[in-house]
Image: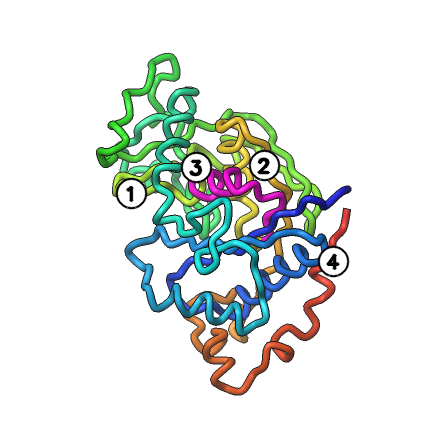
Amino acid sequence: MSFSPYRGRLAPSPTGYLHLGHARTFWIAAERARAAGGVLVLRDEDLDATRFQLAFADAMIEDLRWLGLRWQEGPDCGGPFGPYRQSERRTLYRAALARLHAGGWIYPCRRTRRDVLEAAGAPHEHAADDEPIYPPAFRPDPGLPAPPLPPPDEPIRVNWRLRVPDGEELVFEDGRYGPQRAVAGVDFGDFLVWRKDDCPSYQLACAADDAAMEISEVVRGADLIRSTFRQALVFRALGRPPPRYHHCPLLHGADGVRLAKRHDSLSLRALRAGGATPESICAGWSAEATLTE
């Protein structure tokens, strides 16, 4: 397999200080781009206005540079596919939503999260960290056209979901975990592409950005494997091929719980203050960064 031209990316969200798990995943992404002689892009995924803080955005770049990571495109250095902050890319997302609408992929949803959870039944029917299967009974008649979207300069005040092709098996080859399979409508259901607070969903924004920035490989945590199937459908609806994927194992704390931004003691900022060096943090990670066919 040829890895040239290779375009990888780092896509942190400034909702807290980066922790050791982020560091390993981003380091692997940087090493894979370097080994391929490719380009690494830094994309600031700052769409979560309820948790985003400017201080975290500045710290994110500072901590990644302290760790030794270098990128060729990003919010701090520019590049041909900017802007590199998602909050500045809304025009692209509205255009992507319009394309999904024109293709008949999406429909408005006025059901609440509580409606969906109650209809989904027992908690075991979906993973604790994943959304429940959207009940088919809540779907509108597929033979009826969806109502029009508001003009691009007007806000969207209703959720929009992508209708998945029930029963279709989706497959991709993961660079770390090998063949991955999921059945649409069984393993995941209709998912949000735009929220009623007038914000694109992670699935839409991520896929639209990876397509527009011509990302050839996505390196991210294994908790996002299920999202890959959803994003594959967004790529299809946009008429764009998906990138390759390499999902990294998650790190866990001493309590056995996977690391999150609430683990302040394992943030890069805290480790640095405690005397850790980039070399001591990255030691032993090289095997994960090997490029494989």
Which amino acid, mark 4?
Answer: Thr
Tell me the distance, in whole angstroms, between the alpha carbons under discs 1 and 4: 44 Å
Q: Secondary structure at mark 1?
A: helix
Residue at image position (48%, 55%) is: 74
Residue 288 x, y percent position in the rendering? 70, 61
Residue for badge 3: 133
Q: Which numbered mark, 3 or 4, is in the foreground of this view?
A: 4
Residue for badge 1: 114
Residue at image position (55%, 35%) is: 232
In the rendered image, residue 221 lying in the magenta stretch gets the answer: no
Which amino acid, mark 2?
Answer: Pro
Residue at image position (33%, 15%) is: 145
Which amino acid, mark 3?
Answer: Ile
Q: Residues within 10 Å of mark 3 (few under 14, many from 20)?
A: many
Residue 60 x, y percent position in the rendering? 45, 66
Q: Secondary structure at mark 3?
A: loop
163 or 291, which lies in front?
Answer: 291
Is 278 rendered above or below residue 218?
below
Tell me the distance, in whole angstroms, between the alpha carbons under discs 1 and 2: 33 Å
Colouring method of the image: rainbow
Looking at the rendering, the stretch of residues picked out in magenta corresponds to 204-219
63 or 124, which lies in front?
Answer: 63
Quadrant of the rendering where the N terminus is positioned: top right
Q: Which numbered mark, 1 or 4, is in the foreground of this view?
A: 4
Q: Earlier in the sequence, mark 3 or mark 1?
A: 1
Tell me the distance, in whole angstroms, between the alpha carbons under discs 2 and 4: 21 Å
Task: Report the residue that reaches farthest toward the bottom.
Answer: 275
Residue for badge 2: 242
Residue at image position (52%, 31%) is: 233
